[in-house]
Image (tube, rainbow, N blue to C red):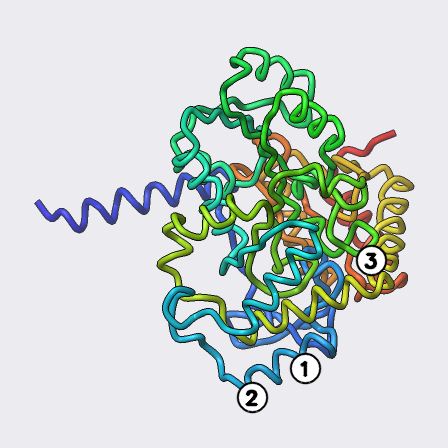
Amino acid sequence: MNTTVNVTALLEAELDAVKAQGRYRDYLHLERRTDLAPRALVHRPDGDTEEITIWCSNDYLGISHHPRVAEAVAEAVRTVGLGTGGARSISGTSTYHQELETELAAWYRKEKALLFTTGFGANDAALGVLGRKIPGLVVFSDELNHASMIQGIRGGGAAKRIFRHNDTAHLRELIAEVGPDVPKLIVFESLYSMEGDFAPIEEIVEIAEEAGALTYLDEIHSVGIYGATGAGYAEEKGLLDRITLIQGGFGKGLGGAGGYLTGPRVIVDLVRSFAVPFVFSTSGPAPVIAGALAAVRQVREDSAERDLLAARSAEVKAGLRDRGIPALSYDSHIVPVLVGDPHKNKELSALLVREHGIYVQPVNAPTVPAGTERLRVTPTTRHTAEDVQTFIRALDKSWSALGLPRTV
């Protein structure tokens, strides 16, 4: 028996099943350029290129293109080169890392901050350590939390209770089932990027304080966009000082890459000391860290970009409402357009690219529940008012071409 052939056939069958369900992801090969944004060049397998407009980027504020950020990266490359040469404990802690962690701690009014090479890694590592190191911990987690948070909670091995999305009454019920002396941690996001809705963070904080629970808030899709200085939704609600741990990252509103954790010194130091992904990972390249520091300072000092994003988002939502194109939520700058069928969703995305030069990646199960397939539309500050109207017209025409249902 040829085992290799049998395994290959088995794996091909798995992939065929994914394709039959409409879940197989096709990737566009994009050439992003600062002079074209929000447009980019897509490279086809036949060697042709085509200019398209991107409507699914997480670079919400266009900070990746900001001259201040670009110059900070370039200066760091000229000064120290690319890599750091090791993990943080060996030779990978540069002055850039120290300066950025100090800036983040001050931004969130916390005792300490810690950098990670990815936002996923920050959640995975931090929640894993808390689960392992707090005896008897029970974690209360929103059912729609990021996969990174779910993985971190599982890895920590602590007992867990899952509460229905944004359902504070259900959270109260679950907490009431646990003894008052049991250590508790409530884990949630401020903005759920696939739903486009905000968490009721005031109520969650009140519940946590009543129960004596720690809180862990993922702000990754709110950073730079909400709050007086762009620290996120907790800042906007005046709750920074009442949340134990805040996680964020540079890959969305701050236009770069990497993640971070901020909070009490003892907890951050615990994660720093025991998180295997942190201890044994090469630290983030100094130029990337320098760019992140410049991005943080830019959004702290200037609200113009987030004001512009709010205006563009409002224009998109008004256009969808006018044409009866359903959205799951109108709460935030992220607008999830509900299609509800995996094949139609992929077909709609392909039609927008093919006929209109507009790219919105379809989001299908298992990323979202089956039957709620959607286009996750994200305006940015680089889109103009004319771009918005062009997009709405194209979506409206494509929606009709596929016979998709509209709201009244």
Q: Earlier in the sequence, mark 3 or mark 1?
A: 1
Does residue 191 appear to the left or right of 391 in the view shown? left
Q: Quadrant of residue 194?
A: top right
Q: How many marks?
A: 3
Disc 1 marks which residue? 71
Does residue 277 appear to the left or right of 395 in the view shown? left
Q: Nearer the viewer, residue 401 or 54?
A: 54
Disc 3 marks which residue? 306
- Pinpoint residue 301: horizontal percent, then vertical percent: 81, 65
- Residue 78 tag number: 2
Q: Secondary structure at mark 2?
A: helix
Amino acid type, label 2: Arg
Q: Quadrant of residue 133?
A: top left
Looking at the image, residue 245 lies above or below residue 315? above
Residue closest to the far left: 1
- Pinpoint residue 155: horizontal percent, then vertical percent: 39, 37
